[in-house]
Amino acid sequence: HAYGDCYHRLIDGYQAENIVVYDTETTGLDLTKDQMVQISAVKIGRTGDIIDTLDLMVEPSIEISKEAYETHGFDLEYIRQNGGLTAVEALQRFSDFTKGCVLVGHNNLAYDKPLVSRQLQENSLPPLDILAEYDTLVIAKQFYPFLPNFKLSTLCERFKVVNECAHNALGDITATGQCLIA
């Protein structure tokens, strides 16, 4: 850590406009078996503007749980009609999009990162080639411990960010990026 600052890579990435915010939607909540049905990422600039976007539907090889469907609204037919890729195709495109960046998500260290890492490994793909990874949930706990909880919706309320499409990976990352910049 430069000067003992664990956020130096995040700050450097922000200044270099090299931050990618990402999120996944999945077939369920079991990190040992569930799969992505959507993976989205945006590269954000210093003013919070979106420089580049990746938004992929992923066709899972397992059933989408009723609870997951009720959360994000994606069934297999919808995924196929909206360009559903194989996990390998989606993971390769995500890996290319994030190469050399500082990766940020909300609750990603506990959920999205292990899920993506497992799916990369299961599909014989290399780990992501990134500079660092940060979690806005962890950051919020450190800097705003007085908040009632650390859900993305609570952070959006705190920073007056409107999440146009909650529980859609692209909507969630747009809101996460705006909360990070705020």
Image (tube, rainbow, N blue to C red):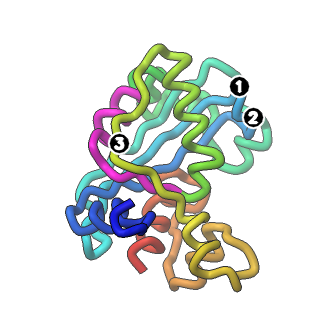
Q: Secondary structure at mark 3?
A: loop
Give the residue furthest to the left. Answer: 16
Q: Secondary structure at mark 1?
A: loop
- Magenta span of residues: 90-105
Q: State the separation of the CA atoms marked 1 and 2.
A: 6 Å
The label nearer to you, 3 versus 1, is 3
Q: What numbered label is drawn on residue 33?
A: 1
Q: State the separation of the CA atoms marked 2 and 3.
A: 25 Å
**Residue count near mark 2 (Cα–Cα under 10 Å), binned few <14, some 14–19, many ≥20:** few
Q: What numbered label is drawn on residue 130?
A: 3
Coordinates of residue 156 in the picture (x, y in percent): 56, 76
In this rendering, position of residue 56 left or right of residue 163: left
Q: Is residue 63 above or below residue 1?
A: above
Q: Secondary structure at mark 2?
A: loop
Identify which residue is drawn at 50% across, 16% down: 123
Question: Residue 54 lies in magenta, yes or no?
Answer: no
Q: Between residue 152 and residue 82, name the one nearer to us.
A: 152
Residue carrying label 2: 30
Coordinates of residue 97 in the picture (x, y in percent): 30, 40
Coordinates of residue 180 in the picture (x, y in percent): 44, 71
Q: Between residue 156 and residue 55, name the one nearer to us.
A: 156
- The residue under label 1 is which amino acid type? Lys
Q: What numbered label is drawn on residue 145?
A: none
State which quarter of the image contains the N terminus.
bottom left
Identify which residue is drawn at 46% across, 28% down: 84
Question: Residue 102 lies in magenta, yes or no?
Answer: yes
